[in-house]
Image (cartoon, grey):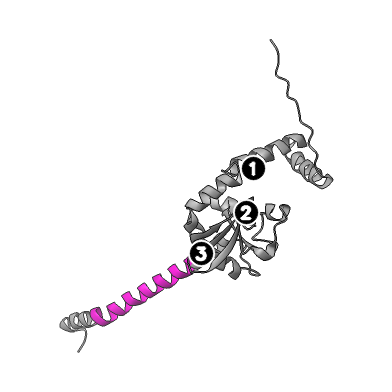
């Protein structure tokens, strides 16, 4: 009976990446080669498409999820990939990438692109271009713990609206779009509940106060 022999493949990586992997592997007490393999598995599990072609087919069927109304032009072997019309009637040049930073790796021209649509991006802007990503990873890792420790649910909003909200939180204390949306909703609910209590109080003052006074008067407590 023969044992299973695990053969490692030699992978060329930069010294900086090797250093980062070694630190990560050290914290888990495993070889950095294993850490590298795990990163590949995480990528595979997180990205639901095997190619940009698969992603583009899904994108075309789900334009509204990004705030787009229709495709004006689809290009092959040319960047940007699409010319689309958004919900407000504006024409946008859209580049699709599985990973947002591939836009720079592929040496695309930022001056020709209005929006980058991707599955994941570590930043909200790449080469100065706004990014719309399926996976909205918070900048603060603690928000991930808060999300799964509490009673949270998924809320989908149009991509155009999301982009406007992202611009509003630039330079503020909000670390992610999710935290800002939660803040806005809490303010709205607080105002609505405050108005409802005010209306209830006013309704009592106008209708019930007279009835209470008449009752007290009949009992001899009021003249």
Q: CA distance from mark 3 to mark 1?
A: 31 Å
Q: How far from the left and from the top, in percent, is residue 167? A: 60, 68
Circle 2 packing at 10 Å, graded few (<14), some (14-19), many (20+), is few
Q: Which residues are magenta?
A: 185-209
Say above or below: 130 vs 222: above
Residue identified by numbered label 1: 43
Q: Are marks 3 and 1 in contact (CB under 8 Å)?
A: no
Most frequent secondary structure within the magenta stretch: helix
Q: CA distance from mark 1 to mark 2?
A: 21 Å
Along the viewing direction, whichever of 35 and 146 lies nearer the viewer: 35
Q: Is residue 194 left or right of residue 98?
A: left
Q: CA distance from mark 2 to mark 3?
A: 37 Å
Q: Are marks 2 and 3 in contact (CB under 8 Å)?
A: no
Q: Residue at x 69, y 63 (%)?
A: 110
Q: How far from the left and from the top, in percent, is residue 185? A: 47, 66
Q: How far from the left and from the top, in percent, is residue 201? A: 33, 77
Residue identified by numbered label 3: 85
Does residue 96 appear in the picture of this structure?
A: yes
Along the viewing direction, whichever of 145 and 98 lies nearer the viewer: 98
Q: How far from the left and from the top, in percent, is residue 173? A: 63, 67
Residue at the far right: name it: 15
Residue at the far bottom: name it: 223
Residue identified by numbered label 2: 142
Looking at the image, tell me whether mark 3 or mark 1 is earlier in sequence order: 1
Looking at the image, tell me whether mark 1 or mark 2 is earlier in sequence order: 1
Assess whether residue 215 is covered by the magenta stretch.
no
Q: Is residue 163 left or right of residue 28?
A: left
Assess whether residue 191 is covered by the magenta stretch.
yes
């Amino acid at each position: 009976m023969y044992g299973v022999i695990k053969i490692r493949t030699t992978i060329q990586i930069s010294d900086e990446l090797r250093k980062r992997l070694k630190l990560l592997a050290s914290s888990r007490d495993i070889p950095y080669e294993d850490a590298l393999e795990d990163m590949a598995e995480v990528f595979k599990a997180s990205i639901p498409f095997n190619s940009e072609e698969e992603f583009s087919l899904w994108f075309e069927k789900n334009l509204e999820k990004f705030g787009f109304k229709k495709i004006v032009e689809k290009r092959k072997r040319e960047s940007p990939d699409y010319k689309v019309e958004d919900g407000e009637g504006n024409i946008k040049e859209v580049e699709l990438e599985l990973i947002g930073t591939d836009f720079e790796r592929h040496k695309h021209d930022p001056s020709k692109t209005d929006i980058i649509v991707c599955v994941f991006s570590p930043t909200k802007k790449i080469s100065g271009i706004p990014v719309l990503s399926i996976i909205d990873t918070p900048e603060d890792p603690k928000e991930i713990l808060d999300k799964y420790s509490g009673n949270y649910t998924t809320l989908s909003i149009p991509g155009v609206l999301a982009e406007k909200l992202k611009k509003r939180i630039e330079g503020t204390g909000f670390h992610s779009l999710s935290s800002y949306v939660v803040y806005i909703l809490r303010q709205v609910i607080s105002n609505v509940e405050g108005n409802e209590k005010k209306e209830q109080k006013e309704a009592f003052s106008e209708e019930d106060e007279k009835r209470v006074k008449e009752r007290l008067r009949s009992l001899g407590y009021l003249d």
